Structures are given as structure tokens and as C-alpha cells.
């Protein structure tokens, strides 16, 4: 029995579907039904499921060397670090690999606190940075934090406004962490005014500005990094999700001012940057390096938001590139998502009672986008 919770802890509300195959923006269940995937493993399959170049890179590297650990060099890891550094925070940028987004956030917090020799961490309301203790302490959501108290000391949160940020960051602040597009709370694009205030406050008080691009980076909003569409460059950048083409990898990208903060023995982990995953990530970056793909993400995003706004029962529509959400004026988002999956074979996600999120693979075709919107219209029509 595959659809069984008998031996799985109960922390995920799983849908009663078993997927067995994926290709591009399509998934197939065990009974052979095809689905359109507008969730992409929660923003992971940016280059689509089982992209042939990613599969080939994994197969080739798996047959050569799978693991040696971080006391040695391997070509896929060194190449990947160089590519992430060169495409992000400028000369002198260095990379620390992790297994996940939350661990990238942990590394960013540790880096900022070491640099400041202590200090507070400020995060923003509606933020989500992960489930490990440091990342959770920077995720000011009562329902996620309360069962696991006490949290890490020295974390504070403020409203995601320029004025609140100016008031919250002071000389004791080691870091201000934010998602330039807040994902898990329902896709909220922070305005330039907020990001500029964040940059200025960090500069004025010697704090690190951390952009958590675990969800909004890697082409998701139509540039390799979302910050490229803003007037602000962060000091530290976190990435994960789409980087490994479906395999688990994250990274802390440290700009020149923080690149040499970590010294041998400060921080580490057994698996990160291992050859097979790094080879997959290099294949992912080859695909995301295509400027035509990124331009298409921006165009399809505009089209998606325009068409969502026309659907019956849809209120606010928000997003950037192919990271989008809409609110249902009458609520019922989890029910819509359930019906979409089981009746229309369209994979969506509810971030709350009224909000539905769409994170399709960036390689969706025009026909697939049209088809998904048609299925949504069908579900929403009275
Ligand atoms: N940061 C952001 C912005 C995220 O969206 C997530 C996951 O959704 C995380 C961090 C945590 O990443 P992971 O689930 O890989 O630990």
C-alpha cells in the first residue's frame, strides 16, 4: 500500500496521490493519469521534471564518484561555487554549500553573528526562513514557533515597511534577513522603498543584509537572482530549492565583505557540495543561463497575472515572474486546491485559507499555461 500514513509522522497534510513519473511540467500518477504541475515540488523543478541534461549529468557523475566529503576538492563543487559567485555578489564573493534552504539560512545567521561578534537578528512579519532552530527563530509565525519554544535568543521581527525597518535595526543588530518576495505567506513582493531602507539601515549600523532567495531566486522571477530587479545588492544571499534540479542542495553566497568570515572549523556538514548534486546543479545553471528563458518567465508571468485577474471569484493577484498567487474573494483555497488535483489533475498549492500559489516549472509551454488557466476557470465557474 503506497498511499499509507502508517509509518510516516503526521507533519504533512498529504494528498491521496502517488506520483511515479515526471517530464517537464507534467507528472503521472500510479494509474497513468497525467497532471499539470503548477507547484514544481514547491518551487524546485524550475528546469522541469527530469530535464534530460540534469539526468545525464547525474548519471555520468554517479558512475564516476558519489562522495568524498569536504576535506577534499572535487571539480563539480569548485565549478559550481565559481559560477554562483561570479553571477551574484561581485568580486571576492565566496560560497558555502548546504543540504537545504534552512541550513543556508543557518549559515547566513552564523556568518553575520560571527562578523559582529554577537548581535540581534531582525526578520520581517510574514517571513518564512525554514524549520531548523535559527531559521525558525527568524520565522515570526506563532503557529510554527509556539510548539517548539524556547527559540534561539536575540531574534526580533518588524513589519515589512521602510519605517519599521528603520526603527528596528540598530547598533546591536548583526543581521536583517528578508525574502525580497515573501513566498510561503502568499507571495508578497517587497517594494524598492522597503529594500532600500533595509540596505541603508544595515549600512548605517554595520549589520549584514541577508536576502533569502531560496524560493524567489534561480530564475523564478525572471532574472537569475531576484535582487537584480531591485536597486539593492545584499551582503549575504541564500539559495536552495531549484539549484539541484530536484536533488537536495543549498548555498550561502557571501559577498566580499563577509566572504572571509568563516575560518576552518567554524561551520561544516558532511554532504554539501557532493559531486553528483553539484554536477546536477551545474546542469541547472547551464539551462538558467539562457537569457531567452528568463525573458519568457517575465512575459509568461505578466500573462498569468492578467489572466488570473479575469477569473471568477478571484480578488487580489500578486507576484513576479512565475511566482504568483491569487486570493479567493469567498475563501476556500485548500478546497479549490484539492478539487484542482482530483477533478482537473492540476497541481496547485494553498498558502492559507484564501490564497492559492502557482509555481510552475519555468519551462512550461504556452499550451500548458493556457490549459492550466482553462482548468482553473472551469473550477471557479459557478
Ligand atoms: N527560505 C525560504 C524563503 C523558503 O521558501 C524555504 C522553504 O520553503 C526555506 C527557506 C527553507 O528551505 P528548506 O525547506 O529547503 O529547508
Image (tube, rainbow, N blue to C red):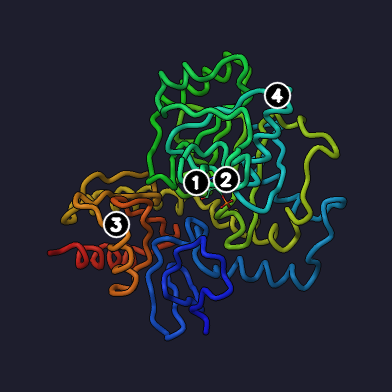
Whether residue 102 sits left or right of residue 337 in the image: it is right
> Is ligand 1 closer than 8 angstroms to the Cβ of mark 2?
no
Q: Which residue is mark 2?
A: 148
Q: CA distance from mark 2 to mark 3?
A: 27 Å
Which of these two is toward me, 366 or 65?
A: 65
Name which residue lies at 25% across and 68% down: 375
* Residue 333, disc: 3
Establish if 110 lies above or below 380. above
Q: Residue at x 62, y 60 (%)?
A: 283
Label disc, if present, on residue 163 of the rendered structure: none
Using the numbered discs, state the Cα–Cα distance from disc 4 to disc 3 in whole angstroms. 42 Å
Which of 190 and 286 lies nearest the eye of the viewer?
A: 190
Q: Are marks 1 and 2 in contact (CB under 8 Å)?
A: yes
10 relative to 267, above or below: below
Q: Is the residue at mark 4 in contact range of ligand 1, meaning its CB lies under 8 Å from it?
A: no
Q: Compared to 55, does 119 lie above or below?
A: above
Query: Sequence-wise, which precedes: disc 1 or disc 3?
Result: 1
Callout in the foreground (1, 2): 2
Depth-wise, is mark 4 or mark 1 nearer the camera? 1
Helix, strand or loop at label 3? It is helix
Separation (CA) of disc 4 from disc 2: 23 Å
Q: CA distance from mark 1 to mark 2?
A: 8 Å
Q: Nearer the viewer, mark 4 or mark 2?
A: 2
- Residue 186 drawn at (x, y percent): 37, 46
Query: Which badge, 2 or 3, comes first in the chain's sequence?
Result: 2
- The foreground one among 284 and 325 is 325
Q: Secondary structure at mark 1?
A: helix
Residue position marked by numbered label 1 in the rendering: 144
Q: CA distance from mark 1 to mark 3?
A: 20 Å
Amino acid at each position: 500500500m503506497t498511499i499509507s500514513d502508517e509509518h510516516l509522522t503526521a507533519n504533512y497534510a498529504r494528498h491521496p496521490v502517488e506520483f511515479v513519473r515526471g517530464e517537464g511540467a507534467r507528472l503521472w500518477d500510479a494509474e497513468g493519469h497525467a497532471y499539470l504541475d503548477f507547484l514544481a515540488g514547491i518551487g524546485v523543478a524550475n528546469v522541469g521534471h527530469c530535464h534530460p541534461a540534469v539526468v545525464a549529468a547525474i548519471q555520468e557523475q554517479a558512475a564516476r564518484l558519489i562522495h568524498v566529503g569536504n576535506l577534499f576538492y572535487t571539480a563539480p563543487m569548485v565549478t559550481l561555487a565559481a559560477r554562483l559567485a561570479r553571477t551574484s555578489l561581485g568580486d571576492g564573493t565566496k560560497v558555502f554549500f548546504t543540504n537545504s534552504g534552512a541550513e543556508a539560512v543557518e549559515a547566513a545567521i552564523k556568518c553575520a553573528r560571527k562578523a559582529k561578534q554577537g548581535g540581534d537578528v531582525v526578520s520581517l512579519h510574514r517571513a518564512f526562513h525554514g524549520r531548523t532552530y535559527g531559521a525558525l527563530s527568524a520565522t515570526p509565525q506563532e503557529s510554527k514557533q509556539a510548539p517548539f519554544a524556547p527559540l534561539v535568543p536575540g531574534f526580533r521581527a518588524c513589519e515589512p515597511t521602510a519605517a519599521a525597518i528603520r526603527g528596528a535595526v540598530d547598533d546591536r543588530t548583526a543581521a536583517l534577513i528578508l525574502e525580497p518576495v515573501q513566498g510561503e505567506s502568499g507571495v508578497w513582493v517587497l517594494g524598492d522603498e522597503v529594500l532600500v531602507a533595509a540596505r541603508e539601515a544595515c549600512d548605517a549600523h554595520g549589520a549584514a543584509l541577508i536576502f533569502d532567495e531560496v524560493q524567489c531566486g534561480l530564475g523564478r522571477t525572471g532574472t537569475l537572482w531576484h535582487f537584480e530587479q531591485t536597486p539593492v545588492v545584499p551582503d549575504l544571499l541564500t539559495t536552495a530549492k531549484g539549484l539541484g534540479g530536484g536533488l537536495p542542495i543549498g548555498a550561502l553566497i557571501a559577498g566580499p565583505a563577509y566572504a572571509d568570515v568563516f575560518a576552518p572549523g567554524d561551520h561544516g556538514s558532511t554532504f554539501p557540495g557532493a559531486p553528483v548534486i553539484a554536477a546536477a546543479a551545474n546542469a541547472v545553471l547551464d539551462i538558467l543561463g539562457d537569457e531567452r528563458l528568463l525573458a519568457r518567465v517575465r512575459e509568461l508571468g505578466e500573462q498569468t497575472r492578467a489572466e488570473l485577474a479575469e477569473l471568477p471569484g478571484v480578488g487580489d493577484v500578486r507576484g513576479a515572474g512565475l511566482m504568483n498567487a491569487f486570493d479567493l474573494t469567498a475563501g476556500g483555497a485548500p478546497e479549490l486546491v484539492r478539487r484542482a488535483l482530483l477533478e482537473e489533475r492540476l497541481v496547485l498549492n494553498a498558502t492559507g485559507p484564501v490564497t492559492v500559489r502557482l509555481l510552475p516549472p519555468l519551462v512550461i509551454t504556452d499550451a500548458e499555461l493556457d490549459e492550466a488557466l482553462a482548468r482553473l476557470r472551469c473550477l471557479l465557474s459557478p
